[in-house]
Image: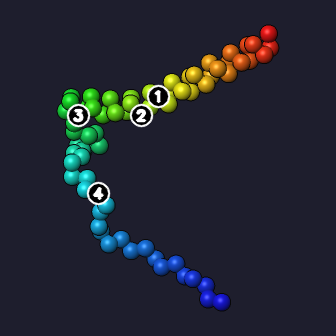
Amino acid sequence: MKKNKKEKYIDDGHTIYSMDGLRKDKEGNLDVNKKEKRAIIKAAMAVYLPRFLLIILAFVVTILLMYFWLK
């Protein structure tokens, strides 16, 4: 039986997505204006807030079940 040798990966330099729209300064901070910053925060809240509320709801339900079970 032959063993399949893995070929060594050679980077050919192509990109999947152009990152030209993201501007960074020397400290690594993104150069965005107030409108873009608000949009970034709004998008993050739209993603993380429902998850956070679901976790809080799960804790409340667990505490209520424990309260009524141990009463």
Q: Tell me the CA gap for discs 2 and 4.
A: 23 Å
Q: Which mark is residue 34?
A: none
The quadrant in which residue 43 appears is: top left
Residue name at image x 47 percent, y 28 percent: 50
For mark 2, what is the residue?
47
Inter-mark Cα distance, 2 to 1: 7 Å
CB atoms of marks 2 and 3 within 8 Å: no
Q: Is 4 positioned to the left or the right of 42 in the image?
A: right
Is 56 positioned to the left or the right of 26 in the image?
Answer: right
Horizontal and vertical percent for residue 3?
61, 85
Callout 1 secondary element: helix
Determine which residue is flagged by label 3: 36
Q: Amino acid at mark 4?
A: Tyr
| Kind of residue indicated by mark 2 | Val
Among numbered discs 3 and 4, the one appearing first in the sequence: 4
- The residue carrying mark 4 is 17
Label 2: state its secondary structure: helix
Circle 1 packing at 10 Å, graded few (<14), some (14-19), many (20+), is: few
Q: Residue at x 75, y 13 (%)?
A: 68
Whole-number angstrom distance, CA of label 2 to CA of label 3: 17 Å
Residue 50 marker: 1
Identity of the residue furthest to the right in this view: 70
Viewer-proximal residue among 49 and 41: 49
